[in-house]
Image (cartoon, rainbow, N blue to C red):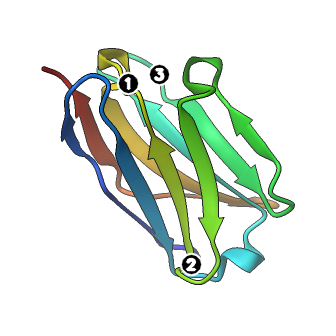
Amino acid sequence: QVQLVESGGGLVQPGGSLRLSCATSRSIFSIYAMGWYRQAPGKERELVASIDIGNSRTYADSVKGRFTISRDYKQNTVDLQMNSLKPEDTAAYYCNAKNTGESYWGQGTQVTVSS
């Protein structure tokens, strides 16, 4: 089992920045891939960014150049730095951890981009 706890969401104006953090109950050295997903009302959950154990990163086209995913081995977290936020980034953001045959989700954190 892996427990994930997200933090860092909130209300921000367009063009602003937020940093989301996902704390894991297991060492991130032992987790093959971690990612951030988001789900807006009435829409399906979508991948925002992921990072694997080799630090290979994947980003949704809509966030490339604005968001950065990283692993913090000291803090045992996976963070998502979000810059130049747009109203369409408004969603509940979820942390995910994957190993072979396993997938775990956090409870989510709300990000609202509005003036």
* In front of the other: 79 or 13: 13
Q: Is residue 85 above or below residue 51?
A: above
Q: Position of residue 110 (x, y in %)?
A: 26, 42
Would you name the residue on which mark 1 appears?
Answer: 89
Residue 28 visible in this rendered orientation of the protein: yes
Q: Position of residue 1 (x, y in %)?
A: 59, 76
Asked whether the beta carbons under mark 1 and mark 3 sit within 8 Å of each other, the answer is no
Residue type marked 1: Asp
Q: Residue 54's image quarter?
A: bottom right
Q: Residue 89's image quarter?
A: top left
Left or right: residue 69 versus residue 11 is right
Crowd band around label 3 with a 10 angstrom C-alpha radius: few (<14), some (14–19), many (20+): few
Q: Residue at x 35, y 24 (%)?
A: 40
- Mark pair 2, 3: CA separation: 29 Å
Asked whether the beta carbons under mark 1 and mark 2 sit within 8 Å of each other, the answer is no
Q: Residue reaching furthest right?
A: 54
* In front of the other: 47 or 16: 16
Would you name the residue on which mark 3 appears?
Answer: 44
Q: Residue at x 65, y 19 (%)?
A: 61
- Mark pair 1, 2: CA separation: 26 Å
Would you name the residue on which mark 2 appears?
Answer: 76
- Mark pair 1, 3: CA separation: 14 Å
Residue type marked 2: Asn
